[in-house]
Structure formats: structure tokens, C-alpha cells
Image (cartoon, grey):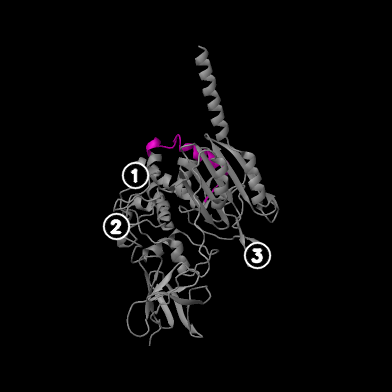
């Protein structure tokens, strides 16, 4: 009996030691936030969820700078692309209702889209494997500026003009906001309710998320809302004035407390479909060649230093956010900011080392950055492109090519001329941009080009002012 008692004492001591080792050092999080976030500027709310509840909730900074209103637990943030998981859940509830299938062709719900919609499925929209072009990229090509208003009709018209997809549906994975705008409209067309109404009735209401809404009308009043701030040319912070009538890819306003209620539902789904629905949403897509991707329905699924990470970031209109779950230890991290100067992913690296202490593998050393001048610089010869106005039927917009002091320059709507430099054989690229102009091979000056992002199919522009 004495041996059993002694053994029991040892086991209890070990359990106590392990529990102490795994406890979260909230004082260290406090110290980090005090050092990182200024109290007199738009700032951030940070929440830690442990064993199903919001075990830590702190706010530093201002919700509204004009009236010096501080952030509090009542503060409502836009979460931008973190919203995609709510859209994905709504779509999967319609699957549970038997009203749609993830194998349905997109054209079944969007007959106004091009023939390529016959080849892509609802499930591929959810997992960014459809090949549908990103509307934000297309609108930037059109000269769209962040304050400009747009709605779903504008996006459908833009997508309806596209003559190609970025790739054959199912063969690759490329993040596309367009897919989630289409999914939001699909929910409306199938259910007869807007995504805002559907989410309120089937998701936010039942979970008691009283401060959460899909913000589908820029005239809406959202009690407790914060405002997003971004740096201005003079270095000061100004209020971001973006306006949009589109949700699905973004648009959710919520609080840390409401996200904690949402988080709990992943462990005990009360909205329909039980654990099978959660598993379906969290299963990464598999491509046609059998390769598994890192993206599921509204989530990135990664391994973070030995822990399974299910999460997403968001960035739009002066707001930045991060919400990531670590199911194996039943912990989650939320960082919501209304100041574009802050980086939730960078903050998360520090916070997770505290929040998951005792559960993480050692961090891998990052390779040193190459010294300046180490690049293997190459000079390309590139075919000249004729000055003039070029038109894209798919974008319904004009770009202008000009020459100045021997430089070839590109000007897109509402933009300043940018010098084009040869970056490959018959490839011209504007500096600090994400796209390039592919010029067809041939003799003389080219009178057409394709705008290409990475290795995806190009959008053609043709010269329009020839004699």
C-alpha cells in the first residue's frame, strides 16, 4: 500500500509539473503588447482561447481617432478574408439541406458566366482550385482605386467578360476572391436570403454572436464598430474610406468575444451536419494529379512547429487580422487590428511562442538574406512594343504605352506612367508590380500583349489607334 501511495504521489507530481509547464504566461503577453502597440493610436485587440473559452482578452489603442475612443471588449472589427470561413460554412449548410452539391457545376447557378463555368464546381470555388480570375486583380488592372464603390453586379459583369480561366479547374490552386463572391451570391440565389440574412438566421443567431454581421451595405450602422486607419503620404494615419457592396470574400464585422463562440462550435457543432461538416470544411483540396494542397474551405491548413494549424488572415481597408486554431491542444489565437501599420502574422510568431509554450518544436533558423549584389543579374533583349492605346475586351479598359527619353512606359487608368524593363525574353515588367507584359515574338514593333501574373493565362490587350 505504501508503494502504491508513493507511486500515486509521484504521478500526481508529474501531472502537476506538466500542467505548470503548459500554463500560458499571460503576463508575458501583456508585456509584449505594451511594448508593441501604442496606446494613443488605432491599435489591436488580442484574444487567447483555451479549453473552449476566451481566457485572455486585451485591447490597446483607439477604436476611433477623431474622438479619442479607446478599444474595448465591445469594439467591432472588420475581419476581411477571415470572413471566408463563414461563407464556406453557409454553403456547406446548404449541402446539408440537400439544396446543392459540391460537385455541381458553377454554370448551374450562374448561366451568365462564360462556358468555362461548366468545367468548375462549387467545391472548387471553396478551395480556390476553380481557376476563376481574382476580381480585385482585374479591377486594379482597370484602374480601380480603394475608395471606389462596387457591387456584385459589377463583379459578375467583369467575370462574364473573361475568355479564359487562370488554369484548368482542378489542376492548380490559386487564391481567388472571385470564388467567394460567387459563393455568397449562390447562397442568395438558392436560399432566397442574402448571405447576411442567411448567416444571421442559421449561424450567428443560434450561436449568440450578437455583434457579428456580414456588412453588405456601406450605409449600415454597426454599433460599436471601429474604423480602419492607414498611413497617408505625410506619414500620419488617416481613416480608410473604402466602400463596397460585396461580401463573401470579406465583409464580416465581429468581436473577439463572438469569435470565441464561433471557435467553440468547431469542437461541438450545433449548426447542422455535426462533426462530419466540420471535417469536410477542414479537409484540404486534392488536385487532379493527387497532390494535396494547403487550403481547405475558408482555411489554410498548416503545420506550425509541430502543431496542426487551422486559420486565416485578413487585410482590407485599414483592418488587419488573424484567427488561428490549434485543435490538438484546444487553443486558439485572435489578433484584430484597425491600424495598417501593424502585422498580425508577425505578432502571432511572438504570441504563439508564449501561448503554446511546451507544445512547439524548436523554430527553424531562417536562411540569411543574400548580400546586395549577389543576384545573378542577366540582361534580356526584348521586342519593342508600339506606343499607343491598347484595349482589353475582358477588362473593358484601356492601357497606354508611351516612350519618354528612350524609356518605354505603361500607364493604366488613374495611374502614373511606369517604366517597363525587360525581365525575360519578350517580357516587359513595370517595377514593383505583380504582373508582366508578355509580347508575342515577331518582327517590328508589337501591337498586342498579354498581361500575365506568375504562370497563369494572360489577358490580351490589342492596339486600337492604328491608322
Q: Position of residue 86 (x, y in %)?
A: 46, 46
Mark 2 lies on residue = 118
Q: Position of residue 421 (x, y in %)?
A: 46, 76
Distance, label 3 to label 1, CA atoms, is 51 Å
Mark 1 sits on what residue?
99
First-in-chain label (3 vs 2): 2
Mark 3 vs 1: CB contact within 8 A: no
How far apart marks 3 and 2 lie (CA) works out to 48 Å
The CA span between labels 2 and 1 is 19 Å
Is residue 246 among what the camera can see?
Answer: yes
Residue designated by label 3: 235
For residue 258: magenta?
A: yes
How many marks the image carries: the answer is 3
C-beta proximity under 8 Å, tags 3 and 2: no
Is residue 185 toward the left or the right of residue 104 in the image?
Answer: right
Q: Give the class, few, some or many, for how many residues have Cα within 10 Å of label 2's Cα (few <14, many ≥20).
A: some
Q: Secondary structure at mark 2?
A: helix
- Is residue 205 visible to us here? no
Quarter-wise, where is residue 449 in the image?
Answer: bottom left
| Side of 422 relative to 319 (left or right) | left
Q: Position of residue 403 (x, y in %)?
A: 48, 84
Mark 3 or mark 1, whichever is nearer to me: 3
Magenta residues, start to end: 252-276
In terms of depth relative to the viewer, which is nearer, 464 or 263? 263
Amino acid at each position: 500500500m505504501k508503494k502504491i501511495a508513493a507511486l500515486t504521489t509521484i504521478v500526481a507530481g508529474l501531472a502537476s509539473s506538466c500542467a505548470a509547464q503548459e500554463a500560458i504566461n499571460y503576463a508575458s503577453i501583456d508585456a509584449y503588447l505594451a511594448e508593441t502597440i501604442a496606446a494613443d493610436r488605432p491599435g489591436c485587440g488580442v484574444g487567447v482561447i483555451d479549453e473552449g473559452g476566451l481566457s485572455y482578452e486585451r485591447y490597446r489603442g483607439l477604436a476611433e481617432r477623431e474622438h479619442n475612443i479607446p478599444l474595448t471588449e465591445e469594439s467591432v472589427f472588420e475581419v476581411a478574408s477571415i470572413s471566408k470561413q463563414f461563407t464556406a460554412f453557409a454553403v456547406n449548410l446548404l449541402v446539408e439541406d440537400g439544396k446543392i452539391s459540391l460537385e455541381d457545376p458553377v454554370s448551374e447557378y450562374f448561366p451568365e458566366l462564360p462556358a468555362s463555368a461548366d468545367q468548375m464546381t462549387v467545391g472548387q470555388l471553396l478551395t480556390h482550385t476553380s481557376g476563376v480570375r481574382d476580381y480585385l486583380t482585374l479591377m486594379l488592372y482597370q484602374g480601380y482605386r480603394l475608395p471606389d464603390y462596387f457591387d456584385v453586379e459589377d463583379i459578375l459583369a467583369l467575370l462574364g467578360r473573361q475568355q479564359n480561366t487562370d488554369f484548368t479547374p482542378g489542376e492548380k490552386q490559386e487564391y481567388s476572391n472571385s470564388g467567394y463572391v460567387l459563393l455568397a451570391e449562390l447562397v442568395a440565389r438558392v436560399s432566397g436570403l442574402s448571405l447576411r440574412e442567411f448567416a444571421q438566421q442559421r449561424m450567428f443567431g443560434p450561436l449568440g454572436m450578437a455583434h457579428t454581421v456580414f456588412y453588405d451595405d456601406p450605409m449600415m450602422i454597426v454599433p460599436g464598430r471601429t474604423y480602419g486607419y492607414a498611413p497617408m503620404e505625410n506619414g500620419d494615419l488617416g481613416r480608410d474610406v473604402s466602400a463596397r457592396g460585396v461580401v463573401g470574400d470579406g465583409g464580416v464585422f465581429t468581436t473577439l468575444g463572438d469569435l470565441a463562440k464561433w471557435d467553440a462550435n468547431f469542437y461541438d457543432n450545433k449548426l447542422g451536419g455535426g462533426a462530419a461538416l466540420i471535417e469536410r470544411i477542414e479537409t484540404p483540396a486534392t488536385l487532379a494529379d493527387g497532390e494535396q494542397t494547403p487550403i481547405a474551405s475558408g482555411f489554410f491548413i498548416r503545420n506550425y512547429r509541430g502543431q496542426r494549424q487551422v486559420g486565416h488572415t485578413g487585410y482590407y481597408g485599414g483592418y488587419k487580422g488573424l484567427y488561428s486554431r490549434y485543435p490538438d491542444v484546444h487553443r486558439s489565437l485572435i489578433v484584430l487590428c484597425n491600424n495598417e501599420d501593424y502585422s498580425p502574422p508577425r505578432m502571432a510568431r511572438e504570441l504563439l511562442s508564449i501561448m503554446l509554450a511546451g507544445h512547439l518544436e524548436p523554430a527553424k533558423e531562417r536562411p540569411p538574406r543574400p548580400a546586395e549584389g549577389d543576384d545573378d543579374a542577366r540582361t534580356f533583349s526584348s521586342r519593342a512594343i508600339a506606343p499607343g492605346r491598347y484595349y482589353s475586351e475582358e477588362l473593358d479598359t484601356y492601357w497606354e504605352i508611351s516612350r519618354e527619353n528612350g524609356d518605354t512606359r505603361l500607364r493604366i487608368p488613374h495611374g502614373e506612367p511606369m517604366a517597363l524593363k525587360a525581365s525575360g525574353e519578350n517580357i516587359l515588367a513595370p517595377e514593383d508590380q505583380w504582373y508582366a507584359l508578355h509580347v508575342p515574338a515577331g518582327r517590328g514593333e508589337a501591337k498586342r500583349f498579354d498581361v500575365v501574373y506568375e504562370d497563369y493565362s494572360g489577358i490580351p490587350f490589342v492596339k486600337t489607334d492604328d491608322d
